[in-house]
Image (cartoon, rainbow, N blue to C red):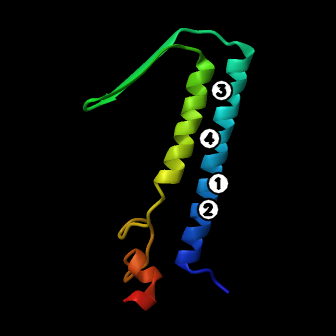
Amino acid sequence: MEASIYTQFIQTDAIVRILAELGGILCMYLGYKLFQKGAVGNSDFAASKGDLTFKIANASPGIFFALFGAAILCIGLVKPPRLNPGQGSNPPGIDGLTALHPSQK
């Protein structure tokens, strides 16, 4: 029995999400261990968008590593992968999600 495109997409999506979340958790853990060991360094970070400004000053490398891991976790949870029509190696006549849900045509 051959798996449908929809099933393959769901399986790939699950694998990508699990690996991304494990990578984020690993970065957070290693950042915590760096912070715990007392790795020193005067690092600054500033970001702004419009009126919103975010700044971290005189932070250790472990803090940045842990924040990077947290960002990976948040982005992985908030932005799901999409199956866009016309991308990849879809056979002719298959146009993205409409081909995956023939009952909704």
Distance from disc 1 to disc 2, alpha carbons, whole Å, reads 6 Å
Mark earlier in primary sequence (3, 2): 2
- Could you say where residue 45 lies in the image, as x and y percent from the top left? 44, 19
Q: Is residue 45 left or right of residue 21?
A: left
Q: Can you give x and y, in whole percent of width and height, for residue 28 in the image?
A: 65, 33
Element assignment for label 1: helix
Q: Nearer the N terminus, badge 4 or badge 1?
A: 1
Tell me which corner region of the image, top left, top right, bottom left or bottom right, holds residue 63: top right
Q: CA distance from mark 3 to mark 4?
A: 10 Å
Which residue carries the number 4 mark? 24
**Residue depicted at 37% across the width and 89% down the height:** 105
Which residue matches tag 3?
31
Q: Residues within 10 Å of mark 1 (few under 14, many from 20)?
A: few
Amino acid beneath label 1: Ile
CA gap between label 3 and label 1 equals: 20 Å
Would you name the residue on which mark 2 appears? 14
Residue type for callout 2 = Ala
Label 3: few (<14), some (14–19) or many (≥20) C-alpha neighbours in 10 Å: many
Q: Position of residue 38 (x, y in %)?
A: 70, 12
- Choose between 94 and 54: the one closer to the eye: 54
Label 4: state its secondary structure. helix
Residue extending farthest to the left is: 50
Query: Mark 4, residues whose alpha carbon is within 10 Å: few (<14), some, or many (≥20)?
Result: many
Mark 2 lies on a secondary structure that is: helix
The residue tagged 1 is 18
Q: How many marks?
A: 4
